[in-house]
Image (cartoon, helix red, strand yellow):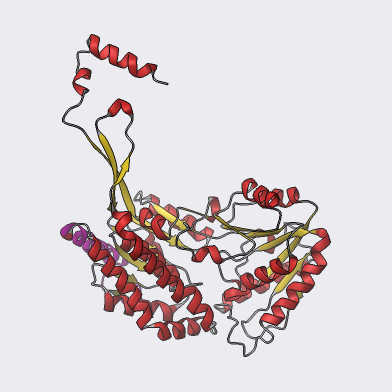
Amino acid sequence: MSMAHMADGQSQPLDETLNELLRAMQTAHLRDGFADLALRCDRLGRIGAMVRENQNTIIAAIDADFGGRSREETLLAEVFTTLSSVRHAKGGVAKWMRPRRRAMDLAFKPARATLLPQPLGVAGIISPWNYPLLMALSPLVGALAAGNRAMVKPSEFTPRTSELLAEMIAKKFTADEVAVVQGGIEVGAAFAALPFDHLFFTGSTNVGRKVMAAAAANLTPVTLELGGKSPAIIAPDANLDVAVTSIVRGKLFNAGQTCVAPDYVLLPQAQLDAFVEKALAVAVRFYPDLADNPDYSSIVNQAQFDRLQGMIRDAETQGARVLTASVGVGRKLPLTLVLDSTDAMAVRREEIFGPVLPVIPYGDLDAAIGHVNGGERPLALYAYGRDRANIDRVLRSTISGGAVVNDCLIHAGVEALPFGGVGTSGMGQYHGQEGFETFSKLKPVMYQSRLNGMWVLNPPYGAKAKALIKLLLKRP
C-alpha cells in the first residue's frame, strides 16, 4: 500500500490517517494469527522477486535521486545486499522460529523451560537516503522473517526511489501486510509517534534522539541505527599500501555517504607524508576523472554538498592544510585530506558523511587508543596491522558497534554478523538471526511436571518446608 505525500491535500488529520492504517494492520495480525513458516518464506520471496524484477528501474531511480550514482555501487550495496539478506533469512527462519530449550536449575526440576519466539505485531521502519533501497528493505526482511507486518517511511530526500518502493510494495503485498508512507518532516514526526510494537530507525544521531523521545510516549521499543566518527587506526607495523588502498576504497564508495565509512585516520607520525602521497595517488588511480566518470557517485543534494564545503572552509579558516586528489565537478567532490586539524574544527566534531578525511598522526598506539576513547563510541572501527598483539590491544581497549581488521566497510554486508551501534552510534542490532530476534518476543515458558514437589511449600510452612528452604540455601 502506498500513501504518497500524505501531508498534501489530505481529507482528515495526518495523525488520524496514520493511526487508522496502523490499527488495520494490528487487527489483521490478531485476526490471522501468527504467520507460519510457509507464509514467512512467501513474504521474503516476494521481497526478493520484487528486487530482481525491478533491478534496472531501481538503478535508474537511485541514479536520478543522487544526480549520478554508480551503477556498480547500487548493484553491490543495494541489490546484492538486499537479496543476500533475503536468502539468509529464508535459509535460517525455520531454525530461528523453533522453541529454544533452556537448562533448568536442579531446584526446579523436573519442570522444563523454553524460549518461544513470537512476532511482536506491527513494526515501523524509518529509512535514510544514503542507501534508500537497502536501508528500507533490510530491516523489513527481519520484520517479515519474525512474522510481523510493517509500515515503512522512506526518505523524502530520495523521492524517486521512495515512490518506486511504494509502487513495488503495493504490487507484492496487501494493504494490511506492508505499507509505505511517504512525506516530509511532518509525516516523519507523526510516524515516529505511532504506537508501533517496535520502531526501527536509521539516520543521524540528532534525529535519532527525537525519534526515541517520540517513541517513549508510547513505551515503544526502538532500534536506532545511527552513525558517528568511525576511526581507521594504522598500527606501526601495518602494510601501508594495503591500508591506504582499503581506506580510500571505503571512503570513496558512494562518495563517503556511508554510515560506516572511515571518518578519520590515526597513523604513526613517521608515516604521515607517505600516507598522504599514496592516498592521493590511489584516489586518482581509482577515479582519474570525475566529470564523466560513471563509477564515482555525486553528493545526494545541494544541501549536503554545501554542508561538506562548509566543513572544509571551517578547517581551512582555522589553519588546517587541505589537499585534494583532483578537481571536483558539479556535486562530485574528490577525496579531500585534512591535515593539522584540531578538535575545534567541524571535521573533528561532526560525522562527515562525505569524501573528506582528516589524517591525524599519533606518537604511539596508546595515544591512538586514547583518542578513540576520548570521543563518542563509533559505529565501526578499522584496525590495520600485522602484529596480532597490537590488533588485539586495539580491539580490547576500544568499544565500537563493529570492527574490521585490515579492511573496512565489508562487515556491513555479512548477514551472519549482527549490525548495530553502541552509545551515540545506536542501540539494538539487526541482520540475520539478530534481526529476527529484534522483531520478536522471545517469550520464556516454563512447563511444570505433573510430578513435582511444590506441595512442600504450601502454607502454613511446616518442618518439611523449612528443611527444604534450608537445603536450597546451602547450595553453592
Percent position of residue 271, x then y: 80, 63
Q: Nearer the viewer, residue 323 or 319?
A: 323
The answer to whether 350 is drawn above or below residue 45 in the figure is above
Q: Residue at x 57, y 71 (%)?
A: 257
Q: Residue at x 53, y 62 (%)?
A: 411
| Left or right of residue 145: residue 267 | right
* Image quarter of residue 119: bottom left
Asked if residue 195 can be seen in this view, the reply is no
Q: Is residue 66 left or right of residue 244?
A: left
Between residues 157 and 354, which one lies in front from this camera angle? 354
> Which residue is located at x 81 percent, y 59 percent?
269
In the rendered image, the vertical position of residue 255 relative to residue 148, given as above or below: below
In the image, what residue occupies the spot 60% across and 68% down?
A: 353
Quadrant location of residue 184?
bottom left
- Front residue of 281/370: it is 281
458 in magenta: no
Query: Is the N terminus in the top left, top right, bottom left or bottom right quadrant?
Result: bottom left
- Side of 439 relative to 464 (left or right): right
Is the C terminus in the top left, top right, bottom left or bottom right quadrant?
top left
Front residue of 377/208: it is 377
**Residue 427, percent from left and from top:** 48, 52
Assign the magenta stretch its main secondary structure: helix
The image quadrant of residue 325 is bottom right
Which residue appears farthest toward the top when viewing the image?
A: 463
User: Does residue 12 appear in the picture of this structure?
Assistant: yes
Q: Is 283 located above or below residue 199 in the figure?
A: below
368 w.r.t. 21: above or below = above
Residue 394 point in image, percent of width and height: 66, 50
Q: Position of residue 414 (x, y in %)?
A: 48, 63
Q: Which residues are magenta?
A: 5-31
